[in-house]
Amino acid sequence: MSAAGDNPVLRVVVVSNVSKFGGGGVVGFRDMLLAIRTKRPDADLIAVIPQKGDVARQCVEDGFEAKIAWTPWWGFGKWSRFPIDPHVLIGWLPYCAILLPGIVQALALFRQRRPTMVVTNTMTVPSHAIAAKILGIPHHWMVREFGRDDHQLWFLFGYRRTVRLVGRLSDSVICNSHAVEQAMLALDPTMKTRVLYPVVDTDLGTPPQRQPGERMRTVLVGYFSEAKGQNLAIEAIAIARSAGVDIELTLVGTGSHHPLHNLAQRLGVDDLLKIQGPTRDLGPYWADAHVGLMCSQSEAFGRVTVEAMRAGLPVCGTNSGGTPEIIEPGVAGLLSPAGDARAFAANLMALEADEDLRRRLAHNALKSAQRFQRDRHDDELATFLGLD
């Protein structure tokens, strides 16, 4: 029976954790809304967004109702100055108080609008999931991150307990990769999970040719942090230079670039490094490169990996997280152990030395990346939510 079987109006509330575009999670939020409308044009869709901004404006342009509401997080950024989680020092109550207004506001919204179901995007915001549980409304959680291993978040109730709460507050937990699913099930084997790969339908490119004697150019996209592995990429091109091979590296992202410049200077490769600020148009960077990089220690999925492949680039990646689900090693790119700069450098030098290999991997990458289509995503999401 359809999820709307007991309700003449299919009303779906989809909750965002952020109000600005930047990162794959918020793109996936919009894609979910578009998918539900495509599969069920009769649905009344309400997008809950924490603040006014780019996301709210885009929802209005897309024809969705945008509801600005408090969506407090229960996962917080790494506190490097504290050897233990801060709530251990000052108690649980102040943090629990942060959640209460969001839960109360969600309860009021649900009582007023009577949604058929609620979908929460990312594991970081719990208020609408809790409110849905209190009122007996079906709730589905879209988990797009490991939480601890990729973003170094600490959680109000601890990581293990949070994962279990995600399962208990949801009719199903939809993960963006099998790697994330396995991480969730490792802590809660009873969790009802599904895997839904994101939509990546950026323009298809043509594998670039590298002229004889031309330096190989690589590009890595992602916010500047230890977890994203920019340091690993810089160390790898330094290792390659020590072996007599110069490989150019462009880093594109947001965050402080001074530590990266300092590292490159210290390793003697500052002339090979370019750092660019954030952009929503990666096309020129893909077009100018010969190889894409994915250096994250634990990437849940890796939208930019697929974008690079769709642009016609083979990808050198780390064999961790969801990356091996995207890159078949030796077919669409090359993989090396996470954090191993020497192994990563060896893969880069292999592509630099063998243009036929690089081009063969590029053509295969272009073909492989076309499986992340919108129709596939929309059909699977509709099935998981019981909309078909």
Image (cartoon, rainbow, N blue to C red):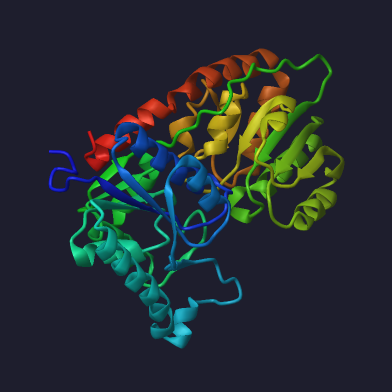
Give the quarter of the figure containing the N terminus.
top left
Q: Quadrant location of residue 234?
A: top right
Q: Is residue 167 left or right of residue 359?
A: left
Q: In the shown orientation, is residue 183 left or right of residue 253?
A: left
Q: Position of residue 33 (x, y in %)?
A: 40, 42
Which percent across, then down, holds residue 130?
Answer: 28, 66
Q: Measured from the top left, where is residue 98 in percent x and y? A: 43, 77
- Position above or below: 159 against 181: below
Does 151 sit above or below residue 340? Answer: below
Q: 206 or 53, which lies in front?
A: 53
Is residue 76 left or right of 187 when viewed as pictured?
right
The residue drawn where x is 54% and y is 41% is: 337
Identify the residue shown where x is 56% and y is 77%: 82
Residue with the most extreme bottom position: 90
Q: Is residue 321 visible?
A: no
Front position in the image: 327 or 39: 39
Please give the count of numbered marks on the rendered protein.
0
Q: Residue at x 71, y 32 (%)?
A: 285
From where the camera sits, is residue 25 visible? yes
Residue 307, position as x, y percentages in the image: 57, 31
As rendered, which of 300 and 241 lies closer to the eye?
A: 300
